[in-house]
Image (cartoon, rainbow, N blue to C red):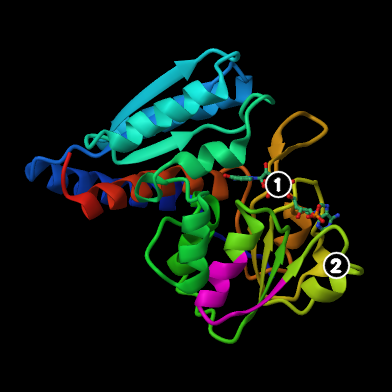
Amino acid sequence: MTAQIIDGNALAKQIRAEAAGRTAALKARGVQPHLAIVLVGEDPASQVYVKHKVADSEQTGLKATLERHPVDMTEDALLARIRALNADASVHGILVQLPLPRHMDSHKVIETISPAKDVDGFHVASAGALMVGQPGFWPCTPYGCMKMLESIGYDLRGKHAVVIGRSNIVGKPMAMMLLAKDATVTVCHSRTPDLAAFTRQADVVVAAVGKRNVLTAGMVKPGAVVIDVGMNRNDEGKLCGDVDFDGVKEVAGWITPVPGGVGPMTRAMLLANTIDAAERTGRG
Ligand code: NAP
């Protein structure tokens, strides 16, 4: 079997087009969706990420404001900036680019963002809302993975999904989203003995580890859906995922590539969350 590819670029394009339509409708009602991005320091990867987030927003008709602060900004000053953005009715979404400089407590910073503007979905209130099935903001990466499953019309009810990785921003919320769709979910991690024994039973595998070749062909049930969240570099320095794509595509039914898979979906879901925030307040 050669797996069908779930094309993250094409799907993200569709989501951006929908987002542009929703933005136009909001603007017609006098609401300009506005994302405030806060960058502290000069981490090179963060600089690239925020540049993309601004460009994606502007291409979709959203307003994006990028605040750059020096690496020696105090935590108190950052918290004060976040409180000011919370109070600014023209701002619908607030994103603090991580990682923050080491002298700052990321948890404290994220918890200062108003849950109503937490478009990254990292606030404890957002995690709690996801846990109990209440409206809130879903973290963009697992949200994008769910959209990929939806795009192939995959019915998760009763299916066995294995999530490899248990981070607060990918693995855990991914597991909650799959549970909410009535999948039977197993979460594996670095202490899981015999990972393959779990993945071989899975109808869906989501790999969110950050190590190449964590999932190889012999670990996959024929016909399974394989979603690769990982972002790694191969020996030639090219972007690759956690999945041995060439091997696994011969066994799986569906597979997401890297690049062109989960990455563009993550970016698209940030726009969707920001527009949700603007629609919920209906002003600004
Ligand atoms: P993380 O916080 O480092 O978590 C990695 C997880 O993998 C941990 O739960 C760890 O287990 C588990 N793990 C490590 N080695 C393992 C092994 N050999 N077998 C099974 N599990 C193992 O990483 P993250 O932030 O969730 O990100 C995961 C990957 O996704 C990274 O490559 C990251 O760059 C990528 N990512 C991509 C996007 C995107 O938009 N495409 C967005 C976010 C993240 P323990 O908990 O036991 O340590």
Decide: is 134 above or below 71: below
Residue at x 41%, y 31% (from the top left corner): 82
Label 1 residue near ligand 1, CB within 8 Å = yes
Nearer to us: label 2 or label 1: 2
- Taking the magenta stretch, the answer to whether it contains residue 232 is no
Marks 2 & 1, CB-CB < 8 Å contact? no
Q: Is residue 272 left or right of residue 215?
A: left
Q: Quadrant of the C terminus?
A: top left
Image quadrant in which you'd find residue 247 = bottom right
Q: Where is residue 37 in the image (x, y as percent from the top left)?
A: 42, 29
Residue 260 image offset from top left, x and y in percent: 55, 44
Residue 39: in sight, yes or no? no
Q: Is mark 2 within 8 Å of ligand 1?
A: yes
* Label 1 Cα crowd, 10 Å radius (few <14 / some 14-19 / many 20+): many
The residues tagged by marks 2 and 1 sit, at their Cα atoms, a distance apart of 17 Å
Image height check: is 258 above or below 97?
below
- As drawn, the label of residue 241 is 1
Magenta stretch bounds:
175-186
Judge from the rendering whether residue 159 lies leftward or rightward of residue 220; answer left or right: left
Q: Residue furthest right?
A: 193
Q: Residue furthest front?
A: 76
Nearer the observer, 147 or 141: 141
Q: Does the magenta segment cover residue 178? A: yes
Q: Which amino acid does label 2 sit on?
A: Leu
Camera sees residue 174: yes
Residue 208: percent from left, percent from top: 69, 54
Residue type of the residue flagged with mark 1: Gly
Residue depicted at x 74% and y 54%:
243
The residue to which callout 2 is attached is: 195
**Secondary element at tag 1:** loop
Q: Which residue is drawn at 58% across and 80% down?
A: 183
Mark 2 neighbour density, 10 Å: few (under 14) some (14–19) many (20 or more) = some
